[in-house]
Amino acid sequence: MTDQQALTLRGRILGAKLRLVRQAAGKSLKEAASLIGVSAATLSSYESSRKFPSLPELELLAYHLNVPLRRFWPKSPTAPARTTADPSTVIPLRQRMIATALRSQRMEAKLSIKELAAATGVSGARLSAYEQGERPIPVPHLEAIAAVYNRSIEEYVDHQGPVGDWDAAQRGLEVLMDLPPDLREFISKSESKPYLRLAKHLSELSSEKLRTVAEGLLDITL
């Protein structure tokens, strides 16, 4: 498979997931598009893979539709909705942050724009525009660039602000849902809080202090 074919495949998979998520949320194209500050025609082009959304757009759509961002790669459970985030403010800021990170990573990798273009199948002109924050970075292109740097796309996901807080809550929920049912039940009980606090405190102790605690418990029980 060529680099261009790989980009096309990424885009088709992403478009299909976008449509499924929107339809599951009961949103029309117009309603969902308004959440990320684009037209219904633009969102339709994302879903049909004629165009690709940027990561900030994808983040904001997942946020407003109350689905985990990782739904667009691995599956994961839903999380509580949070307050409204203004796309006209959030998306440009996030785009600049990603652009800065990409330029820094390319410099660290000691790659020229031409070399990166050859490795990703994305034109040098586009890559330069991405790094300058002059145009949104389609998610399939970001995935291709990240792969060259041996990085996960998760590294570019927002970890600050309302979307970042929401994403952190999702991660916590995912960890909880991955636990065996008996542990989830134990954690959910209010009477378990003292034991959970104790476990947290013990996890923060050094191995030497833990050994001292264990020896003290042995003295008590023997």
Image (spheres, helix red, strand yellow):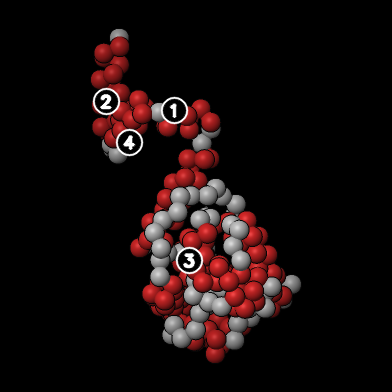
- The type of residue carrying mark 1 is Phe
User: Upstream in the sequence, badge 2 or badge 3?
Assistant: 3
User: Upstream in the sequence, badge 4 or badge 2?
Assistant: 4
- Which one is in front in this view, the residue at disc 1 or the one at disc 4? 1
User: Upstream in the sequence, badge 3 or badge 1?
Assistant: 3
Q: Quadrant of residue 193?
A: top left
User: Upstream in the sequence, badge 4 or badge 3?
Assistant: 3
Label annotation for residue 222: none
Query: Element under label 4?
Result: helix
- The type of residue carrying mark 3 is Leu
Q: Are marks 4 and 3 in contact (CB under 8 Å)?
A: no
Label annotation for residue 60: 3
In the foreground, 72 or 141: 72
In the foreground, 81 or 199: 81
- Which one is in front in this view, the residue at disc 4 or the one at disc 3? 3
Q: Which residue is mark 4?
A: 200
Q: Which residue is mark 1?
A: 186
Query: Element under label 1?
Result: helix
Q: CA distance from mark 4 to mark 2?
A: 14 Å
Q: Quadrant of residue 107?
A: bottom left
In the foreground, 186 or 162: 162
- The type of residue carrying mark 2 is Val
Q: Residue at x 50, y 46 (%)?
A: 174
Q: Are marks 4 and 2 in contact (CB under 8 Å)?
A: no
User: Upstream in the sequence, badge 2 or badge 1?
Assistant: 1
- The type of residue carrying mark 4 is Lys
Q: Which residue is mark 2?
A: 213
